[in-house]
Image (cartoon, rainbow, N blue to C red):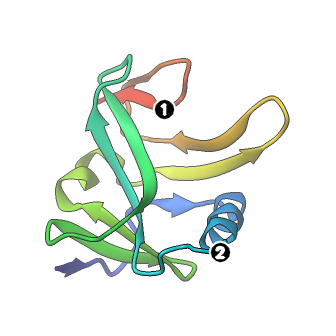
Amino acid sequence: MTTATSAPVTLTEGAINELRRLMGEEGFDVSQRLRIGVKGGGCSGMTYVLGFDQPTDEDERFEIEGIPCVMNKSHGLYLYGMEVDWQGGLNSRGFTFSNPNASKTCGCGTSFAV
């Protein structure tokens, strides 16, 4: 298990508020952590992963404003410095990703290339 001294990604106030709301819902499994990562696929080559999951031995653990987070150690290369935001508007609702490591992104905003 590796624990980071500082978070490799940042969460905006909107993202923090939405994540706290989700974590406060009835039946939320408090043993889970917010997983931030990537997986192959998507129209630009890689897709962001954001969801609650059980930590593994391959994870780096960190906390952002009291929200326990995990990230596969190998994903930091792709995600270091990324900002996650929450858009709560009527036209676009959901988490958005601003990644300084992406060489290109696609229109959906959840797929990127490095």
Residue 44: quadrant of the picture: top left
**Left or right, 90 with reference to 68:** right
Residue 102: quadrant of the picture: top left
**Left or right, 112 with reference to 83:** left
Q: Position of residue 99 (x, y in %)?
A: 45, 41
Please give the residue where the numbered disc 2 appears in the rendered image. Answer: 26
Cα gap from disc 1 to disc 2, whole angstroms: 28 Å
Q: Are marks 1 and 2 in contact (CB under 8 Å)?
A: no
Please give the residue where the numbered disc 1 appears in the rendered image. Answer: 110
Q: Position of residue 106 (x, y in %)?
A: 48, 19
Amino acid under label 2?
Glu
Toward the viewer: 10 or 69?
A: 69
Residue 55 lies, with reference to residue 78, above or below; the image says below
Q: Earlier in the sequence, mark 1 or mark 2?
A: 2
Marker disc for residue 89: none
Q: Residue at x 53, y 41 (%)?
A: 98
